[in-house]
Image (cartoon, rainbow, N blue to C red):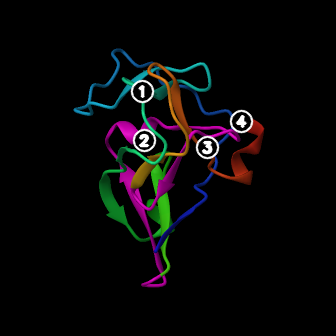
Amino acid sequence: MLKNITPRKPAKGKAKKKQPTLPVFDNERAEVRESGIHGLGLFAKKALRKGSTVGYYVGEKVTSMKDDGDHVLWIYDEDEETEYGIDGVNETRYVNHSKKANANFDGERLIALRGIKAGEEITHDYGEAWSDLG
């Protein structure tokens, strides 16, 4: 069984980078758009049912905290009793934090916790370290 570990909170005071164009990925369920929560976010292209897969966190696997970064999702594998990170390179790296999340990472898989309307931002609760962000 895989269990997500709370990622590190971004450093305060970091300058935001301007995005010249929105990234485009091959995901029929979700797309990246400007977010009212933070910078860019992931939004449902169509209605998603509770329990459906939104996408997968894809990227290079890292095993050392020295490789931690803004888009590394840390995962604990309970069966193997190991933890590893995925340095996200696809659309799921844009999932913003919310205490009232509508999706959850189960390992590398992003799953809808409830029905999500087309156009609604997809969010995940990254934990207490992110509580002041919403």
Residue 47 image label: 1
* Mark in the foreground, 4 or 1: 1
Percent from the top left, x then y, of residue 50?
49, 42
Q: Residue at x 31, y 25 (%)?
A: 23
Residue stretch rendered in magenta on the structure: 79-108
Tag 2's secondary structure? helix
Identify the mark nearer the N-term, 4 or 1: 1
Identify the mark nearer the N-term, 3 or 2: 3
- Real-space Cα distance between discs 3 and 2? 14 Å
- Tell me which amino acid carries mark 1: Ala
Percent from the top left, x then y, of residue 67?
44, 61
In the picture as drawn, the residue positioned furthest to the right comes out as: 132
The residue under label 4 is 133
Identify the mark nearer the N-term, 4 or 2: 2
Residue 118 vs residue 14, the one in the foreground: 118
17 is within the stretch colored magenta: no
The residue under label 3 is 10
Residue contact between numbered discs 3 and 1, judged by CB atoms under 8 Å: no
Residue contact between numbered discs 3 and 4, judged by CB atoms under 8 Å: no
